[in-house]
Amino acid sequence: MTALIKLTDFSVSFSTPRGDLHAVRGVDLSINKGESVGIVGESGSGKTVLSRATMGLMPSTATCTGSVEFNGVDLSRLSRKDLRNYWGTGMAMVFQDPMTSLNPVRRIGSQITEGLIVRLGMSKEQARGRAIELLDRVRISDPFATMKKYPGELSGGMRQRIVIAIAIACTPELLFADEPTTALDVTVQAQVLELLAELRQEFNMTMLLVTHDLGVVAGQTDRVVVMYAGQIVEAATTKELFKNMKMPYTEALLKSIPRLDQQAGQRLKVITGRLPDPTKPEPGCAFAPRCLYATDKCRSEQPPLVTTQTGHQYRCFFPLGGAN
Amino acid sequence: MLRNSIGGKLAAIWLGLVLFFAIFGPLLPVAKVGQTFNDGVHLKPFTNCHFMGPLAQSIERTSALPDMSVSELVNTSDNSIVNDAAPADTLPVDQAVPVAATTTAPTIEGEDVFTEETLPPYIPPDTAVDAQQQEIERQKLLNARQTSTRCFFLGSTSEGTDILSAIVNGSRTSLSISLLSVFLGGLIGCLIGIAAAYLRGWFDRLVLLAFNIILSIPTLVLAFALIAIYATPTSAVETVPDSTRVKVLIASLVVVIIPQLGRIARAAALQWINRDFVVASRSIGATDISILFKRIIPNVLPSIFAIVFLALGSVVVIEGSLSLLGVGLNNGNSWGSLLARNSTDLTDYPHVIFVPVIVIAFTIISTNKLGDLIRQSLDKREAKI
Amino acid sequence: MLRMKTLKLILIRLGQVALVLLGATFFVSILVRQLPGDIAYMINPTATAAERASLRHELGLDRNYFVSYWMWLSPILRGDFGFFIFGGKVLPVIKSAVPPTLQLIFYTQIVALAVAIPLGITSAYKQGTRFDRFISTTLFSLHSIPNFGIGLILSVLVGVKLGIVPPSGYGRISDGLLQHFKFMLLPVMTLAIAPISSYTRLLRSEMIATMREDFVTLAKSKGLSNVRILFRHVLRPSSITLMTSAALSMGGLIGGALVIEIIFVIPGMGTQLAKAIGAREFIALQSYVVIVATFYLLFNTIVDILITFVDPRTRNRHA
């Protein structure tokens, strides 16, 4: 299998008045065609920045180093104008908050057809027909009426479906889904995830699902990458990860999810402490201050990213269940 | 706040200068309010200002007046004095204003030279001239001699007012009008606005309606109508004294300012009243009065303060506009009225208009700049909360 | 459904305006009633006591506020603005004075928007560059010069010294369009400077804020060009704020126009207001103030209603 997108030693930093903020630090990641990969981490772990920077959607205050190869082309060397040719058709993104990601003063129809007309060169009529198909596909009940509506007249779940329709309009090869369900009601969350999975099959898309919820990842992805403080701390196939968890951080994340099979009255485990200050990287494992098992070695020395024979990667001196 | 802004520093310096003129104007060596020179001939800027070097204009009507006896003077008609232009270089060097003189021109010593003692001795009236006539001539002579050496840094108006002096004296009137009206209007407006925000209900609705009604009439039109109605002579022959005009002017400006600042105070107070810390302090049993004074007013005041600066500037403009419309002051004793009074000389003597315009513009740039800076620092504070 | 809702909103808005207008006219009539001294004497000092009494009765001054207000208002509602005390009908004067003032304000808004929109877009797009700083400093300084100052200076420099256009005066449209615009050039330039400055600054900051919105990032991720994003996605939400501000600045413009009319000798409402004061025509003055307030409120209401049509957000906010 060939890698559709390959990040090598990819870092992103922002210059702030308090010094450089390292949001993503030295990430190596390769995603194959047709794969579905989940990126998991708590807020501020750098997962959203990673996905946006991979696409190139960063403000000018950000500096990206390392390389991003898409279908063998190094995107980091492309000019802004050439890069734009990949957006929409090569890769597209579903944004986190459907309330703010649609233009409030333009009709739904024009927002969907715009990409089709500009990028695929469709005529207005063609684009309209395609947009109605798309709306139907994302299970909007009355596509004709919805085309004429403004975002303000629709519910959050409907809007997120429209954001998805916009993203898949030009049939991109790679779809970034940046916390696509976080801002939605729980009942709607499952529907949207299901829709994404269907669409992925149908359009044969590769998907990068960014979320803070290990539960979402479990049913949706082939592979999971866990991020902490801008670094990959664990990566494995989804099955392997849940069966054979190596990082104490991943374990802590899993334990913080409420579960039905827990005894009633039992308290949720929270991860104590906070993320380290991204402007002042400390020596040693970034998770050490909050880790239950941390030793002096963890606090003074940076653990390397270890790869086992099964391809399971982790960044810990004392992995759960031993080195194998 | 001012640390990183050159513009802000300049603005503060200019306003400081204006304030200094306004307070210490009477102590400065400038012509008195209403004092005229020159019997109504325009003088260009830098007239007699020898320290300006080649830029200095020489007065065209300088004559050897001091050497004439009064009887000679009296026999010569008015016109000949004006037109009897002597070459500028005949001006006695020792009477020239010293080079060290500052921009506020004639020094006190310089003025002392021309007190009554240095005039030619009083000669008993001729048979042909009565005493009154002679006194007038004596005054003219006094004026003429002052004119002959006085430095008119910014020139003079057609009435013979020294423009620089008029600006310095005018700052007193202009600044007190705008400070007083903004202070009173702001105070009343804030009280009403904050009370409305705090009490809500019918009082709030009533206040809002009243504000909207007043705001529905454009500011200038309202002030115009108010002054026209209240500072109007009761018959065609009477005139309204300046003191009444000033009072009515300030009162009208107060009426205009109340809803403008009141609305902002109300909005700011509303915003703070709903903040969690106010709700919290109410929940632990703080009284209305203490919440109002300890929590709300200290937070509302800074945002009012930023607007107050902008209002100060706009009041100066309104005052000038009203003068031009013919209902403001018309004695030439404020910047606006100086402008209005001389606006007919615009084509031939533009400097008479440019000077007050520039002074007003600098003042407004300064108040706007400071208001802007205050708002910026408020925004930063807000962002931190 | 939506139509009904919008219609209802418009009706409510018109009701509010009527209430404010009623309040404003009543306020003005009270002001006139409060005139120090005897109005009848002021109007006609030579009148006998009996004549003065009948004049007072005619004006409703011997009745209570509400009655005299109604006595003044009801003919106006029928379009009868009464007579000048010194003779002549008021209505023809209003009819001839309103067009120049309206033209002045209308042209000014057009010029201001035509200059401010491209300037605002360019400085937002080039934010932080030398161009942006130059524009904002220049506009800030120009904005601070009082409009009568600009008017006087322009009429001397352009009107008299250069002699390109007449320094003052007014030409009716019927007397030749070119002449009309020549006369209007300087007053419109004078009046437009302040709104140009405030609109540019507003549009710039509004567009910069909009460019940070998620929906702009989404538009970018569709692979659209910068220019397309700027005009299709950023400008429209920002221009709605600009429209609101343009409506709000109407009051200042009307006030400014009155002064500018005096400076440029344009026979509009400002000139008539000044004349009415000079001649102590208080009844006419009252009508003039009401006319000005009515126009001001009407402008604001029209823009408010227009915005309801243009901005789908407001519709939902009220709903």
Image: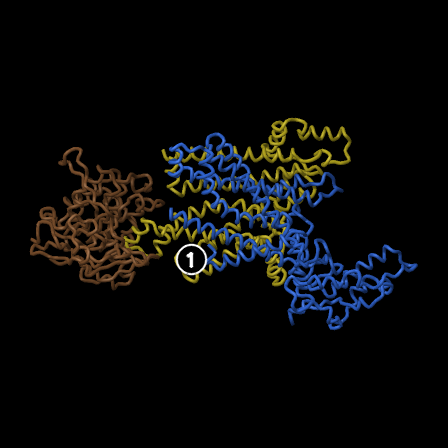
Query: Which chain is tinted brown?
Result: A
Q: Nearer the viewer, residue A310 or C65?
A: A310
Q: Residue at x 77, y 35 (%)?
A: C46
Q: Residue at x 26, y 42 (%)?
A: A183
Q: Quadrant of residue B146?
A: bottom right
Q: Position of residue A221 (x, y in %)?
A: 15, 48
Q: Position of residue C194 (x, y in %)?
A: 52, 52
Whether residue C179 is visible, yes or no, is no
Would you say B376 lies left or right of C218 here?
Answer: right
Would you say B188 lies left or right of C275 here?
Answer: left
Query: Which chain is tinted blue?
Result: B
Q: Residue at x 28, y 42 (%)?
A: A159
Q: Position of residue B332 (x, y in %)?
A: 68, 52
Which residue, given by chain and number where applicable, does mark 1 sit on? C123
Q: Nearer the viewer, residue B242 or B210?
A: B242
Q: Amino acid at mark 1?
A: Ser
> Which color was chain C given?
yellow
Would you say B376 lies left or right of A274 here?
Answer: right
Q: Quadrant of residue A100?
A: top left
